[in-house]
Amino acid sequence: MNDRGMHVTQESLLHWERDCSPVSGNCEEFLSIPGRTQWVTQSLVRPMPKNPFAFAYGCNGLTERFPFVSEVKLAREYDDEKIQACNVAVECTPPYTHEGCADLGGCFSQEIDQKGCYNTDMETPAIVGISFNFLSSLGDSKLDACLEQEPKCMSKQSMMLREATEAAEAQGAEVLTLAQTRSNLFRWAISRVFHARDFDNYIIKAIEFTESGDKFVVHDVDGLLRGPVKRMEQLLQMSLEVSDNTKILFYEDLARDVGKSIEAVQLSYKNPVESVSDVLQEDVAPDENVKDQHPGGLGDYVENLEEFRKQVRKSQPCLYTMALDETPKDTTLILPLKMEDSRIRVDFSRDCCFGDSETFVRTVKDYVQAGLDC
């Protein structure tokens, strides 16, 4: 989206504790509940950097404004426009309304050590926004501790995000809440296995890697799918709680057509934003859009794939459909859903349905209803 003239910060609530302490003396204020939720609000009102201390982190040692030379190690091959942005940047504090908090050029939106800028040729991007993991910390340690277990905790998280977006709307912003995920939970589980090993340094107990390390053997079907299933259930539930009109964009939609997916996002507003395409920059290469998503044949990753299929064919038909090579990797699946104690649950005892290939953005409400009817 940022390559297409928008300004959407990436993983904006990630690693605040880790990244703040080396460069800022205001961490306690940043890491509070107001510090985080007000950041969400202001990121919906105007172009903002990745986090409140991105200027201090990204400009570390480059200017007299940010003379820190701590343990932070940064790339030094910055574009001239990034260095110019550092010359006028200031560290701001809650509620982040100071004009110096804005990142008008998109120089600090994607990563802390971002080399260049996205939107220096634009006065103001037509769409601004913030993206983050839906279970990211909002500064409440007790809430963080119980998000995994207690539905009421997730609903509290939903309410905090709802209030943050309503505060942005009160300032005149039209806010679109967009959930992003993957509908083929088996392929999601495959990516999760490799990500856990390669980035998080642990092996999921449900599998065992082959000697080459390129494939794995599934020993526990339920254990393999437990994480993706739970995340999907939580995301759908929270999406309905945060906004009555939350939209959802699946990885498979992007894989079919990035351009149509982003156009569908633009047209989802009450006042559709069509002008973004006028500042369209060079598209990201197709292979970058599936980076680390393991889009190859399923047998390239799962050693005992046929055994897996036989095990789930009758008892979990939807999972069997997901595990077929005949199911295109860019097909958006309608997951079979049910309601238990007013909570959304995935029901693998029924088969999946297939979404319309010409639809790229759906409302979560419609998707859930389709899953209940599937």
Image: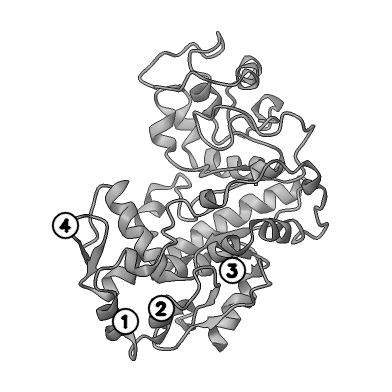
| Three-letter residue code for mark 1 | Arg
Does residue 162 appear in the picture of this structure?
yes
Q: Which residue is mark 3?
A: 240
Q: Which residue is mark 4?
A: 211
Q: Which mark is residue 309?
A: 1
| Three-letter residue code for mark 3 | Leu
Looking at the image, tell me whether mark 3 or mark 4 is earlier in sequence order.
4
Q: Residue at x 71, y 54 (%)?
A: 175
Looking at the image, tell me whether mark 3 or mark 1 is earlier in sequence order.
3
Task: State left or right for residue 55 relative to residue 20.
Answer: right
* Residue 114 percent coordinates (x, y): 53, 30
Instruction: Determine whether label 2 and label 1 are within 8 Å by CB.
Output: yes
Instruction: Determine whether label 4 and label 2 are within 8 Å by CB.
Output: no
Secondary structure under badge 4? loop
Secondary structure under badge 3? helix
Viewer-side label of 3, 1? 1
Secondary structure under badge 2? loop
How far apart are labels 3 and 4 at the CA level?
Answer: 44 Å
* Residue 347 percent coordinates (x, y): 42, 83
Q: Which mark is residue 36?
A: none
Crowd around label 2: few <14 · some 14–19 · many ≥20 (10 Å): some
Instruction: Determine whether label 1 and label 4 are within 8 Å by CB.
Output: no
